[in-house]
Image (cartoon, coloured by chain):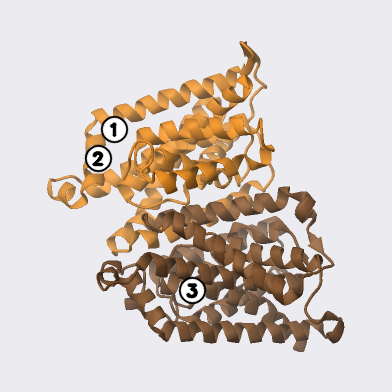
Amino acid sequence: MLDYLVSIALTAGIYAIFALGLNLQWGYAGLLNFGHVAFMAMGAYVTVLLSMNGVPLLLAVLAGMILAGAAGAFLGMATLRLREDYLAIVTIGFSEILRFVLLNWSTLTRGSFGLFGYPRPFQDLVGIRDYNLFLAGLVLAVLLLVYILLETLARSPWGRVLKSIRDDEAVAISLGKNAFSYKVQALALGSAIAALSGSLLAFYLQYINPNNFQPIETFYAWIIVIMGGSGNNRGTILGALILWGFFSTTRFMEGYLSFSPTASSGARMVLIGLILIGLMMFRPQGLLGRKEELSIGR
Amino acid sequence: MEQLIANGIIYGCIIALAAIGLSLAYRILNFANFAHGEFLTLGAYFALFFAASLDLGFLFACILAIAATAAFGVALDLLAWRPMRSSGASRTAIMILSIGVSIAIRNALIIFFRPDALRFPLPVSQGINFGGMTVTSLQFEVVLIAIAAMLLVHALLSRSTLGKSMRALADNPDLARISGINVDRVIRCTWAVSMGLAALAGIMYGLITHLNPNMGWSIILPMFAAAILGGIGNAYGAMAGGIIIGLSQEISTAFLPAEYKIAVSFLIMIAVLLFRPRGLMGGG
């Protein structure tokens, strides 16, 4: 039973942190980041590569967050003065290019062999037997911190300006707010949060490979955010739990259905696509979101 | 080098056809369609399916596949895009929906055809030598058909009533509506043209490489790069953009590992967005 709870806390918790970063960008600022997984990958790889070369873990995690934040800011600066869909095209492209680089720069990343045997926080102190329990506690603590940070920001003047830009950019600009700079900041902060979730994912998996960071991971985060209710942090955490529930139920059902592994994973992904379509068509505000706060104009 | 230029032109023609459809949809339907790659894949698999199951010859199977993909596009409009439009959903909502369509189609193809690479049932075609470059007769035909399709698009856009209605709709939807244009019909025709071109591009891509359920998704980035380079929404720009992207990707393999081909189109796209966001030919 405890093992079960620990595994929920680890997977749903890491995805919740990952999706909270996206909720800041999409839910609060209306930014279409279709390459969120790239920043998770940056967090994971920077943390692992630096810590394997003797950099203290905390610094390695911070370095990943700073690098991902800078990358997010750069992509934003290149596209945010244009129509909003350019950001979507460029970020999805960035996430694929980054995956190709990680796959092919084998002297650094060992390509598709992946990296393993890297340090994890307090691994000598905790011991291997209780490590997942400890890590689950760490993930929940980080999730709580990120949640409190985002809630505080959302209520702060900064968060209110961000929402006003999302709802009507012209009004915010006419009040003297630099909309462009606010959006770049939201993009950078959300990307840094994704990097943090990537470091935690690396600690949990003990093995990272460029193919852990396929574009579909980005859209899991989108489903989590939209299902929970865009712009609602509690909804995002709920969405992460539901998505985790979806995966464990469909895996459980697989035991009873005689599908081949490719057919059943294909069927699960068709369902994921249909869920996204259904949400957009019938309940774009998700479970806890407010219709009038939706950045998609309905 | 001559060989790389030849390969670049062949690949560029395919990207150009795909980018025209993407650009038309962007201009007339007003959103970036992330499911466009899957429409290429769908066209290729339709052709494979018809060629294998009907005894009618490959050319006929291709024509049927293009028609089937276009019909699928019209059905998709009735089922998904039109309800979204009439409920007043914004283009970002429709764009997110297109991601769902892309995931669903790609994985449905994985279920029906398995994820393995497949080939069209055609004999290996003979290479022809053109002063230093070897081009198979098949590749030569691909280029000719692509050029013919582009001329056809040009005729459609500039000469036909449908083309005029499409341009009117793109410039001002409200004005188009009150001047008696049947907006829903024009939009359905746009989908049919856009997806027919995608199917053709998909079949061609399958011919010069192979088919797998990821084939369209894997070249969505060069497609967008070509559309943006040409000025997104501009069909002629998309043609030029496709050829430029195809050539630069292939020529880059002389200096860079081939795995980084796609990165070349990404860099071109970023450079265009930074320095000339309306593209080479100006767009919407």
Nearer-N-terminus badge (2/1) = 1
The amino acid at mark 3 is Asn
Q: Looking at the picture, does residue B120 appear above or below residue A221?
A: above
Q: Report the residue marked by disc 2.
A: B167
The amino acid at mark 2 is Arg
Q: Looking at the picture, does residue B96 appear above or below residue A251?
A: above
The amino acid at mark 1 is Leu
* Image location (x, y in percent) of residue A64: 65, 67
Mark 1 burial class by Cα count in 10 Å: few <14, some 14-19, many 20+: some
The quadrant holding residue A182 is: bottom left
Horizontal side of residue B46 vs A47, given as left or right: left
Q: Looking at the picture, does residue A10 appear above or below residue B174?
A: below
Horizontal side of residue B192 vs B185, given as left or right: right
Q: Nearer the viewer, mark 1 or mark 3?
A: 3
* Image location (x, y in percent) of residue A119: 81, 72
Mark-to-mark CA distance, 2 and 1: 8 Å
Chain letter behind tag 2: B
Colour of chain A in the rendered structure image: brown
Chain letter behind tag 1: B
Look at the image and tell me whether residue B20 can be seen: yes
Q: Looking at the picture, does residue A34 appear above or below residue B229?
A: below
**Labelled pair 1, 3 in contact (Cβ < 8 Å):** no
The quadrant holding residue A59 is: bottom right
Of residues B134 and A42, which is closer to you in this image? A42
Are callouts 2 and 1 both on one chain?
yes
Mark 3 secondary-structure assignment: helix
Q: Quadrant of the C terminus of chain B?
A: top left
**Labelled pair 2, 1 in contact (Cβ < 8 Å):** yes
* Image location (x, y in percent) of residue A29: 41, 71
Q: Which mark is residue A23?
A: 3
In the image, the chain rendered in orange is B
Q: Report the residue marked by disc 1.
A: B157
